[in-house]
Image (spheres, coloured by chain):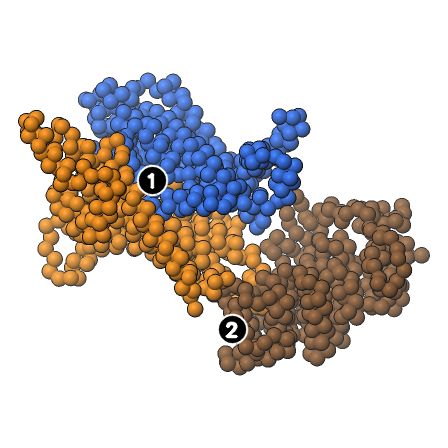
Chain colours: A blue, B brown, C orange
């Protein structure tokens, strides 16, 4: 990459950061996410309790919050506060990975469909439409039931549903970029298709993709939580969704063990909210339609 | 009889970067029967002036000073309800820039005009409908097409329909903001002829906004030239065209090639319009003016009456 | 005159989509690693001796037509679908179709009521938010909407049960009617049903109205920036008239499309809600099928709800075609 290009990107990045700083929601979102990421990463330094199911203290089942256990204990006596801290790891990790994969795949589909047009575009968009129309969660459930539940299976299942939004957005952007003279002139100069896509289209679509992916992390986390709640999550893992699964199946609901039920959901909500705020802030900057208004 | 009297109007826009001084101490007068051409580059404040008069500024626009009297009515102080019922459309109507989209695409054209009429007059739908058909004939559209939707009209037809709607309540003043800019030359000529006709037939007063001088030469009897939020020259049309005094006006006029006249080179006005958040000190035109002097950089020029009814704001004319 | 071509084109898309979905459904349940057929025929099924197992296995293969090539199996499946034969439940041995038809009404009631309520709330608040853009009212509604859409639906249901049913004992916790209660007349039945409907409906509404609100607001803001709205103000129309008789009409159009797309999400949401509230609908059916590895039920129910969503989308497109005059005349 030449010096000029590097400088251009740096200037754009600085301008972008300045614009972002103006969005109150964006800042709040970043703060929320930083807190959660920090806690997840350093969970083992922040707590001495174990989260292993076999290391629970069976004499201390379902205890309400106390000085010893800030958020009480679960059905096998494990400290819930610790579980919440570790729970972020799995939930966030699955969210990131699923969003990255579906974002990447969606981008590829959108780029190729938009750029090549013709029957290639028709087929790709038809596939997109069909995947879109099939109800998401039921399909994820069916696939999970058939594939079995493991860490990577869950990510795969969530990604398979999630790429369509990005594909559509990217394709729309590529279609509008195609009209611009600079693409034509690049072709006239003799640049190959791959070069045009990779070097000219992709950098212009990139901000849009990032905004999309951030929003997708939120929905991926919700999807993982729903799958885990329904019993299709990885039983060995301690994600927030799994904690809620245990809460429901051990009857915390009817027995009024609110400390079991409330915190994981609040964490999910806050994290998804954080990603939504950040995504919203990014979208305001990056989406050409909104800028016009 | 003075129909519209604008005195020292100041309209600013509140933006993140500061106040945009879009209209700064603008004064103009329309007498009954006048057709005033308001000319200037994009962004010079012509539309803002007119929106201020009609009180249709966007939410960040503020009228910070001056007086606007329409037939004696204080347009700044009058309350919203009265403005809506008695002035808007009934006495003062407007054709907006980009009027191609003035009609709501999901309603029929005729129905929209009927609605406009019935807001101000207590008549039946049938009578209003009849009036719309008459209006269509008047502007040159087949009266059977009142039940069509906007997308079924061509560009020229839409413009005629908008004109029909603007005169539907027999207003005293019609303000047309770039009414023919988006049309091709032949249709332009037709629409201008229509407007001239209507003005004669109905005795309308008009403000015609454009950046194209050739357009106003046809219809208007007066011209006002604006630059960067200020009025630089005003007068009757013949004087402005034959004896322009302000350097900006002169610049605008020299760049009109005449088919009959001698061949000459283009002499474009160099430079670009100023930033209206922090306009240049002194005369706003001085950075681009070939005659700029020390005083121009320091002081805002006073408006001088060169001849009867011909006003110029330029230091060079103060002598 | 609605163009026949328009309807036929959409219908063709609808039908071909349904066909593709059927193919997919068939493939999924044959091709996946844990596919039901292999499980059914696995040598561990049953406690019969080895030789008898072989016989039984061969019988089953023949009767299920599994010795025939894949495409023939598909044709047979297609025929079954058309006849409404979705097989029998592994668990209850009842016909899948009758299980579905028992419960489909409950799902429709739940989804319809939640949808209508969401739409009304979204429009009501969306109009206010868009008109007063940038003010405290706008920002507050936005934040609330965003918060609610970030909540997992099943968790919201759980909290609501905890607060309103368990602690406050205001509403029943599960089912459609109170267990063991004899209803004296239709009215008594209805009121019991509605009491049970209330909490799940509120749960679904709370989580979904947020997204709709954002879209209504966005669509309205787009419309408000259009020239014809400025013209309407210049004409002297009252603000209220402009919003409700002009702008909203235009904003409704994209809304129709969004509601159709939203149906897919609503089904997922209804699935979670029905599970939490033990509301006997198609969602609960799927959950139970997953829990008990009852594949025929899973396959059949999934197919039915997907077909319903596809048809609903098709209908929405037709409605949109009628509503937008630009589309109506084939522009």
Residue that badge 1 annotates: C152
Whether residue C240 is visible to the viewer of this picture, yes or no, is no
Whether residue A12 is visible to the viewer of this picture, yes or no, is yes
Q: Which residue does the image show at 26% across and 46% down from the upper left? A: C303
Q: Where residue B97 appears, x then y in whole percent?
A: 65, 61
Q: Which mark is residue B147?
A: 2
Is disc 1 on the same chain as disc 2?
no
Quadrant assignment for the C terminus of chain B: bottom right
The subunit carrying tag 2 is: B
- Circle 1 packing at 10 Å, graded few (<14), some (14-19), many (20+), is many
Q: Where residue A118 appears, x then y in whole percent?
A: 49, 46
The subunit carrying tag 1 is: C
Q: Where residue C269 appears, x then y in whole percent?
A: 31, 45
Q: Nearer the viewer, mark 2 or mark 1?
A: 2
Give the image quarter of residue C291: top left
- Circle 2 packing at 10 Å, graded few (<14), some (14-19), many (20+), is few
């Amino acid at each position: 990459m030449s010096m000029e290009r590097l400088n251009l990107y740096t200037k754009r990045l600085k301008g972008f950061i300045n614009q972002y700083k103006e969005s109150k929601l964006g800042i709040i979102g970043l703060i929320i996410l930083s807190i959660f990421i920090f806690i997840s990463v350093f969970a083992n330094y922040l707590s001495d309790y174990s989260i292993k199911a076999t290391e629970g203290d069976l004499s201390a089942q379902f205890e309400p919050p106390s000085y010893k256990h800030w958020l009480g204990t679960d059905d096998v006596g494990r400290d819930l506060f610790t579980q919440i801290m570790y729970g972020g790891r799995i939930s966030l990790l699955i969210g990131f990975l699923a969003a990255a994969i579906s974002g990447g795949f969606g981008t590829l589909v959108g780029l190729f469909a938009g750029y090549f047009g013709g029957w290639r575009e028709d087929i790709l968009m038809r596939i997109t439409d069909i995947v879109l129309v099939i109800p998401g969660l039921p399909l994820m459930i069916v696939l999970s039931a058939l594939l079995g539940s493991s860490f990577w299976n869950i990510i795969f299942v969530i990604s398979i549903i999630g790429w369509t939004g990005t594909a559509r957005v990217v394709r729309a952007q590529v279609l509008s970029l195609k009209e611009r003279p600079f693409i034509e002139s690049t072709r006239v100069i003799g640049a190959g298709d791959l070069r045009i896509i990779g070097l000219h289209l992709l950098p212009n679509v990139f901000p849009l993709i990032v905004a999309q992916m951030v929003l997708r992390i939120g929905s991926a986390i919700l999807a993982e939580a729903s799958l885990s709640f329904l019993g299709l999550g990885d039983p060995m893992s301690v994600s927030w969704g799994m904690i809620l699964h245990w809460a429901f199946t051990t009857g915390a609901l009817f027995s009024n063990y609110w400390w079991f039920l409330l915190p994981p959901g609040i964490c999910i909500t806050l994290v998804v909210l954080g990603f939504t705020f950040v995504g919203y802030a990014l979208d305001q900057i990056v989406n050409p339609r909104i800028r016009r208004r | 009889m003075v129909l519209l009297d604008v005195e020292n109007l100041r309209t600013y826009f509140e933006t993140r970067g500061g106040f945009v001084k879009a209209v700064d101490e603008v004064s103009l007068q329309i007498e009954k029967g006048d057709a005033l051409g308001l000319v200037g580059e994009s962004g010079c404040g012509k539309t803002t002036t007119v929106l201020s008069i009609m009180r249709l500024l966007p939410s960040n626009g503020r009228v910070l000073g001056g007086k606007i009297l329409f037939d004696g009515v204080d347009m700044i102080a009058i309350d919203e309800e009265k403005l809506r019922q008695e002035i808007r459309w009934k006495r003062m109507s407007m054709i907006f820039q980009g009027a191609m989209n003035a009609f709501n695409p999901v309603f029929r054209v005729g129905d929209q005009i009927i609605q406009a009429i019935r807001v101000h007059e207590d008549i039946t739908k049938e009578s209003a409908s009849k009036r719309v058909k008459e209006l269509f004939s008047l502007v040159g559209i087949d009266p059977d097409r009142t039940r069509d939707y906007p997308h079924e009209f061509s560009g020229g037809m839409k413009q005629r329909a908008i004109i029909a709607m603007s005169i539907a309540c027999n207003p005293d003043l019609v303000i047309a903001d770039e009414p023919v800019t988006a049309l091709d030359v032949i249709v332009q000529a037709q629409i201008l002829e229509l407007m001239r006709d209507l003005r004669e037939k109905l005795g309308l007063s008009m403000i015609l906004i454009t950046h194209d001088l050739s357009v106003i030469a046809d219809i208007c009897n007066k011209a006002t030239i604006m630059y960067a939020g200020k009025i630089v020259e005003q007068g009757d049309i013949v004087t402005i065209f034959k004896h322009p005094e302000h350097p900006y006006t002169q610049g605008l006029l020299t760049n009109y090639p005449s088919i009959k006249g001698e061949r000459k080179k283009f002499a474009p006005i160099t430079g670009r319009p100023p930033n209206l958040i922090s306009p240049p000190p002194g005369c706003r035109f001085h950075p681009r003016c070939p005659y700029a002097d020390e005083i121009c950089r320091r002081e805002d020029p006073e408006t001088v009456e060169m001849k009867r009814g011909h006003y110029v704001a330029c230091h060079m004319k103060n002598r | 005159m609605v163009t026949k071509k328009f309807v036929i084109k959409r219908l063709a898309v609808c039908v071909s989509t349904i066909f593709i979905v059927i193919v997919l459904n068939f493939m999924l349940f044959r091709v996946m690693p844990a596919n039901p057929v292999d499980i059914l025929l696995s040598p561990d099924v049953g406690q019969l001796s080895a030789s008898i197992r072989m016989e039984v296995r061969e019988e089953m293969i023949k009767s299920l037509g599994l010795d025939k090539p894949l495409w023939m199996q598909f044709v047979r499946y297609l025929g079954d679908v058309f006849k409404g034969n979705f097989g029998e439940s592994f668990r209850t041995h009842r016909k899948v179709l009758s299980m579905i038809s028992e419960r489909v009404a409950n799902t429709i009631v739940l989804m319809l009521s939640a949808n209508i309520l969401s739409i009304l709330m979204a429009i009501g608040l969306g109009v206010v938010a868009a008109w007063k853009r940038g003010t405290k009212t706008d920002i507050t509604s936005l934040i609330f909407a965003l918060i609610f859409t970030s909540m997992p639906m099943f968790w919201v249901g759980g909290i609501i049960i905890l607060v309103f049913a368990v602690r406050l004992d205001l509403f029943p916790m599960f089912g459609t009617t109170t267990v063991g209660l004899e209803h004296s007349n239709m009215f008594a039945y209805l009121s019991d049903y509605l009491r049970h409907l209330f909490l799940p409906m509120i749960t679904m509404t709370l989580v979904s109205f947020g997204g709709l609100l954002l879209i209504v607001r966005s669509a309205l803001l787009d419309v408000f920036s259009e020239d014809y709205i400025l013209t309407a103000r210049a004409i002297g129309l009252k603000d209220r008239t402009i919003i409700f008789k002009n702008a909203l009409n235009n904003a409704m159009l994209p809304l129709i499309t969004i509601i159709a797309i939203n149906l897919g999400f609503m089904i997922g949401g209804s699935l979670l809600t029905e599970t939490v509230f033990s509301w006997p609908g198609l969602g609960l059916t799927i959950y139970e099928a997953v829990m008990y590895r009852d594949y025929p039920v899973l396959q059949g129910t999934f197919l039915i709800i997907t077909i319903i969503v596809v048809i609903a989308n098709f209908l929405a497109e037709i409605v949109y075609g009628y509503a937008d005059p630009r589309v109506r005349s084939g522009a």
